[in-house]
Image (spheres, coloured by chain):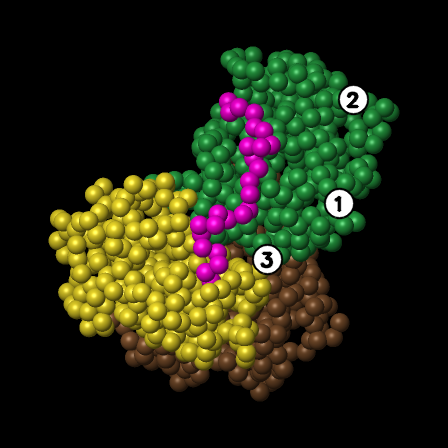
Chain colours: A brown, B green, C yellow
Amino acid sequence: MVDSITTEEVCFSRKRPDVYGDAHPKALLKAIQEEGDYLQNLTEQHVVSTDQFTRDELLQLFRLSAKYEGNPERFNTPLKGKILISAFYEPSTRTRLSFESAWHRLGGDIMSITDRSTTGIAKGESLEDVGEMFNNYGDCVVLRDNNEESVRLMMNSLRIPIINAGNGTDEHPTQALADMYTIFKWKPGLISDPDSTPKLTMGIVGIPSKMRTVRSLLKVMAVFPECFEEVIIFHDESAQKVFDEGQLEQLQEKGLNVTLSSKLNKRLPELDIVYINAIAWVGNTFESFGEKFVLSKSSPLKENAIIMHPLARGEELSTDLDDTHHNWYFSQARGAVFLRMALLTCLCQRTEQVMDIV
Amino acid sequence: MVDSITTEEVCFSRKRPDVYGDAHPKALLKAIQEEGDYLQNLTEQHVVSTDQFTRDELLQLFRLSAKYEGNPERFNTPLKGKILISAFYEPSTRTRLSFESAWHRLGGDIMSITDRSTTGIAKGESLEDVGEMFNNYGDCVVLRDNNEESVRLMMNSLRIPIINAGNGTDEHPTQALADMYTIFKWKPGLISDPDSTPKLTMGIVGIPSKMRTVRSLLKVMAVFPECFEEVIIFHDESAQKVFDEGQLEQLQEKGLNVTLSSKLNKRLPELDIVYINAIAWVGNTFESFGEKFVLSKSSPLKENAIIMHPLARGEELSTDLDDTHHNWYFSQARGAVFLRMALLTCLCQRTEQVMDIV
Amino acid sequence: MVDSITTEEVCFSRKRPDVYGDAHPKALLKAIQEEGDYLQNLTEQHVVSTDQFTRDELLQLFRLSAKYEGNPERFNTPLKGKILISAFYEPSTRTRLSFESAWHRLGGDIMSITDRSTTGIAKGESLEDVGEMFNNYGDCVVLRDNNEESVRLMMNSLRIPIINAGNGTDEHPTQALADMYTIFKWKPGLISDPDSTPKLTMGIVGIPSKMRTVRSLLKVMAVFPECFEEVIIFHDESAQKVFDEGQLEQLQEKGLNVTLSSKLNKRLPELDIVYINAIAWVGNTFESFGEKFVLSKSSPLKENAIIMHPLARGEELSTDLDDTHHNWYFSQARGAVFLRMALLTCLCQRTEQVMDIV
C-alpha cells in the first residue's frame, strides 16, 4: 500500500523555469519583416521534404511560428471547421500529440487512425484509393508510415494537403523546420544583424544516412549556409556509411561546410550547438547508438552552448543538464507545436486570418 | 535514399474532376419539395434496417442530404454540443471516418472506441449495461460489430439513438440509403418527372444472402420499385444460395422486378447502373468473389451507364475507369457523408435548425 | 437471416425512468451554501488520492457537481480552448468515456492515448520526460495505469494537473468522490439538517486491501464520519488480509465506525446503503469475488435501501433490481460525469465562469 498523501505533495506550479528561453520568440518576430505573400505559396503544396521550401518561405513560416509562440492565447480559431486526418501507422505519441495539439489550438477537429490493420490497406486497398477517400472526409492529412513510399503514392490522388510526419528512414520535414526555428529563436541576429552576429559552430551526433531527423535537418540548414561556420557530424567509428551516395556533396554544393569526426569530447568546447539524436528508429525496433557519446553536466561544453535533441532521449543526454541554461531541448519541443501551427494555418488557406496586415 | 524533391512534384490542385457529378445535388434539391414533418418521425428511432423507413421519410432525407451537399460550407453548427460515441468493434476506417467526418462537419464532438477488448464486454459486461452506460455519456451511438445481435441487445436499454453501421452479414442501412441517394442524384427526374424519365435497368454484382450492403440496398430499392425496369443480380455460377429463404419473394411482393444471371458481359450493354461489390466481409477475413466479374474501360458498358461500388475495391473495378464519366463510385462515397449528416441531424432532434421554413 | 424489422421495434424513448433520482441534485444544491474560494485551492493540485481534500473543498465540489447535474444544458463553454490528454494505458472504456464526456460537455478538446506501446515509454523514455512532453501539448492529464507509481513519477515534471483515474490496486479518487456525491444527493439532510437526519448504516461488499475503489471510498467517507452510524465491510470468509497494515486504524482514528462481517444476508435488513463491488481488477485479469454475495429482488433489503455499484457488474448484482427504487447505481454512474465536470473546471482554473457570484 502506498502511504497517505499530503496536500503539499500534490501541489504543483504552472510556471516554466527561466532556462527554457521564453523571451526569444518575440526577438525573432522583430528580426523578420512580415511578407505574407510567400506563405501563399504553401497553400497548394504537400509537405514531403525540406528540399521543397525556399529561404523566404521558411523565414515567413518562422515568423508566424514566433507570432504564435509569443502570444499563445491570442489565435484560437483559424482552423475552425477544418478536419485533420491524423494517420500514424508507425507508432508515435510525441509527434502525433504535437500535431494534434497544434490543430486543436487553432480550433480544428481531428479524426485519428492509429492502427493500420483497421484500414482498407490491410484489405488490399491501394494507397491512391485511400487518398481519394481522405479527400471526402478531411481538409488535411498527417501521415507517419514505416513504408517510405506511402506518402508519395497517396499524393497521386489527394486533393487536400498531406504532411509527411516521418517516412521510414527518409525524411521528417516538420521536425527539421522546428529545429531550424529553434536555432533562429536562439540567435535572431543571424537574420537581422548577420554582420555583427558570429556564425555558429554546430555538432550533430547522428548518422545522416540512417536517421531521418538528421537528413532533413541538414537539408534545411543548407538553405542558410551563411549562418554556420562549420557543421561537424559526429559518428561512431565503426559506422560503415555515414552519408548516402551524393548526400554530402549536395550539402557542400549549397555552401554548408560539413565535416566529420568521431571524437565528440575533443571538439565539444568549440560547439555553440550540440544536436544529439542517439537512437535510430527503424520501424518498431531500434538500434542503439552506443554509449560512447553521452552529454552530461561534466561534459566539456562551451559556456553558452545550447543542446538540442528531438526526444525521446535515452542515456545519451543526462537529466542533470535539464536545469542548466544549456537545456534548449525542452524549448525545442515546445516550439515545434507553434511551427506546426504556422504550417497547418498556411496549408489550410487560413493565413489571412493571422497576418498583421491583410 | 529517395531523390531530392522539387516544388512541382509537391504541388496539388483542390479542384475536383468534372466527372464526379457536382451539379447533381442541386437538381435533386429542386426535384423534391420540402416537407420537414416527415423528418420528425426520425427523432426517436434507432437506425437498424432499411425496412423501417417510409417512402416520404426517405425522400425528405435525400432532400436534406442534397441541401448539405449543394452547399457544404453553410451548415456547420446543428450538432454543436452533441457527443457521438463511435464504436467500431469490427475494423473499419472508411465507414468510421465517413460518420466521424459527418458529425464534425455539423459541429459535434466524438468519443471513439476501436478496440472491443478495452470495454466491459471483454470483462463479461452485458450489452444492455453498455447501452445504459452510453446513455450517460453521449447523444448518439454508431456501432459496427461482427456480432449480428449486438445492436438489438443494446437497443433494450438505450435512450439515445443507435445507428447500425454494419452488423455481421445482416445489414448496413446507411450505406444503402447513401446508394439510393446517389441514384436519385443522378436521375432526379425519377421523382420530379416520372412519366418522361425512363426506368432504370440495374445490375448488382453480389450475393444478397451474404453481403449486407446488397441486402440493405435491395430493401431500399423496393421502396421505389417504379424506378426500376429490372434489377439483375449477377452471381458466381457456383454460388449455392444467392438469396436467403423468403428474401427474393419479399422484394418481388413490393413490386421490384428482380432477376438472376451469371453472365455479366452479356447483359452489360443494357445496364444503366452497374453496382459491383465483389468482396464479402465476414469479420476480419474475406471471401473473394473471384475474378470472373471485372469492370474496366474495355467492358461493353452502355454509353451513359454509371458504375457504383461501396469501396474498398479490389481487382473487380479497374482504375482505368476512374477518369471516365462512368465513375460515380467516388461521387457515391462523397455523397454518403452528406447522407449521414442529414440522418444524424434528424436523430439528434436538430432538424429545425436546417429547414428552409420552420 | 434476421427477420424484417418494424418501426415499432426501432422506436425508443429518451425519458429516464423515475427510479433514477432526478430531483435530487437540486435538493443538494440547496443544502450547501456556495463558497467558491475553497475551489480555488484545487487549481494547483494534482488529483492523486482522496486523502488530499478537505471537508470544505469536497462540499463545494459536490455543490458544483449538483449545479451541473441540475441543469445539464446550461454550462457548455468553461473549458473552451483547453486540451485534455486522456492516457488510458490500462484498458477501460467506462472511466475513459466518463472523463471524455465530462470534458466535451464543457467545450474542451481531447487527445487520446490508449496504447502504451505507441509511447516513448515502450522505447525506454522516462515518465518524467513524458510529463515534460505533456506540458507542451495539453492543459490537463487523466491517467490510468497498472503501474502504481506512474502518476507520482509524472508529477515530478508536470506543470499541468494530472488526475489519477486508477493506478493498480492503489486508488481511484474520482470514483470515490462521485460515490460520496451520490450519497449526499440521496440524503442532503446529512449536510443541511444533520440533527434531524438519521445516520446511515452502510455495507460495503469488497476488500479494501485489494480494491482501489473501496480503498478510496473509505477515505472520503472518513472525512464525513458523522454521517455514518456504522460501516460494515463484508468479505469472503477465506479472504486473508482484508485491510492493509494500518488502514483500518487510520479510518477509525478519523471517527469512522468500521466493522467487519462475512454474513451479508444476515445484516442486509439493517443497511441503508449496500455498496457492492465484486470484481477486483488487477491489470488485465480479474479475480472473481465468488458467488456467495449476490443481490437480487429476493434479497432481504431494507425497504428504502439504495444499492450502489461502480459498474461494470457481473452476477453479484441482478438485473431484476434495475427497475426498483433500490437502483441508485445508474444514478451513481450518471452523477460521476457531473462530478468530473466540476473537478475538471476547478483544475483548469475556470471556476469563475460557473459561480453564481464572482
Q: Report if the CB atoms under discs 2 and 3 are less than 8 Å apart.
A: no
Q: Does residue C224 appear left or right of residue A94 in this picture?
A: left
Identity of the amino acid at label 1? Answer: Lys
Determine the residue located farthest toward the right in the rendered image: B196
Q: Amino acid at mark 2?
A: Lys
- Residue type at tag 3: Gly
Residue B315 in picture, x, y percent from top left: 58, 28
Examine the rendered structure and indicate whether residue B318 appears above or below residue B40.
above
Looking at the picture, tell me which residue is in the foreground, C59 or C24.
C24
Do the numbered discs 3 and 1 sit on residues whose CB atoms are within 8 Å?
no
Residue B67's disc number = 1
Span colored in magenta: C1-25
Disc 1 and disc 2: Cα gap in Å? 25 Å
Q: Is residue B343 left or right of residue C86?
A: right
Q: Chain of mark 3?
A: B
Q: How far is the residue under mark 3 from the one under mark 1?
A: 22 Å
Q: Position of residue C56 (x, y in %)?
A: 38, 76
Labels 2 and 3 positioned on one and the same chain: yes
Of the numbered discs in the image, which one, if any, rests on residue B199?
2
Residue C58, label in figure: none
